[in-house]
Amino acid sequence: MSTVLASKGYIAGTEAPFIKEMSEITHHMWMQGWDELNGGNISYLLEEDEVAKYINVLEPLRTINLTFPVKELAGKYFIVTGSGKFFRNVIKDPEANLGVLRVSADGDSVEVLWGLRDGAVPTSELASHFMSHIERLKVDPSHRIVLHTHATNVIAMTFTHDLDELKFTKTLWEMCTECIVVFPDGVSVIPWIVPGSSEIGRETAKKMRDHRIVVWPHHGIFGTGSTMDATFGLIETVEKAATVYNLVAGKEIKQKITDQQLADLANAFKVTPKAGILNV
Ligand code: 13P
Ligand code: ZN
């Protein structure tokens, strides 16, 4: 903590619960083997009150221009992972690997309030994150988190499975009984697009209007939610189903969960499965 902050009575930035959450989840995800090198990124929407308890919001450290305007997010606070930063290292040095940002009033730039030490910049996927936040907030006011990771089995599945999102979703639902309960809204799939671009941001965000999960073929997955647990759990469940898919691939399937059983599950757990998938 800087002496300036200390003199103003701020608690050390790294004591903030949202910094601890980011440190713990990035460590956990790295342990899954999903976030090799600098793979993966997270953005977490914060309330001004929760930030201001730990971080000086009155004196931004610097401003970074955005190449994609996000007027809808003006004045909003986020903690994000830095570009080129390794999930493995976040827990050892949060201030170098994470950053707390505030979107400017015109939505054309972000102010760095804490972290991203030594000139680091926010994740290169900030367009996909911010555009996804905009769309998810329209349909879910409790939405807060966008999480991107290189989930191994989901990536593997995008080589061998049809990329039609209805077919992709149905296969995942069929792999584990509780999948349809966890993601009745299904998973969405976009075409392969160059990462870090505004185009992949726009295509991802379009899908976020009616999905919480977007698969990027041969790359990874984007998941969204209102808490870190819910968002991670959602991705974990999709990855588990993809793992089962890859385990049974090429083997003789002797029995499976039927469409009627999937419909019965949805009924029992009071969820509405995405339309156009079940033949019942
Ligand atoms: P960043 O290090 O810029 O977050 O990029 C990692 C990544 O996974 C790109 O898709
Ligand atoms: Zn990636």
Image (cartoon, rainbow, N blue to C red):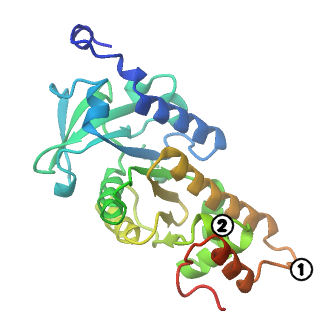
Name the secondary structure under disc 2. helix
Locate residue 113 relative to residue 24 in the image: left or right.
left
Q: Residue at x 86, y 79 (%)?
A: 255
At 38% across and 33% down in the image, what residue appears? Answer: 98
Q: Please state which of residues 117 and 2 is positioned toward the viewer in this rendering.
A: 2
- Where does the image place residue 244, in percent across and percent down from the top left? 75, 63
The residue that mark 1 highlights is: 254
The quadrant of the image that shows the C terminus is bottom right
User: Crowding at label 2, few (<14), some or many (≥20) Cα neighbours within 10 Å?
Assistant: many
Pick the residue in front: 199 or 142: 142
Image spot of residue 89 (x, y percent)? 51, 29
Which amino acid type is shown beneath numbered disc 2?
Cys
Q: Is residue 168 left or right of residue 244?
A: left
Amino acid carrying label 1: it is Lys
Determine which residue is flagged by label 2. Answer: 179
Task: Report x, y in % for residue 229.
Answer: 54, 46
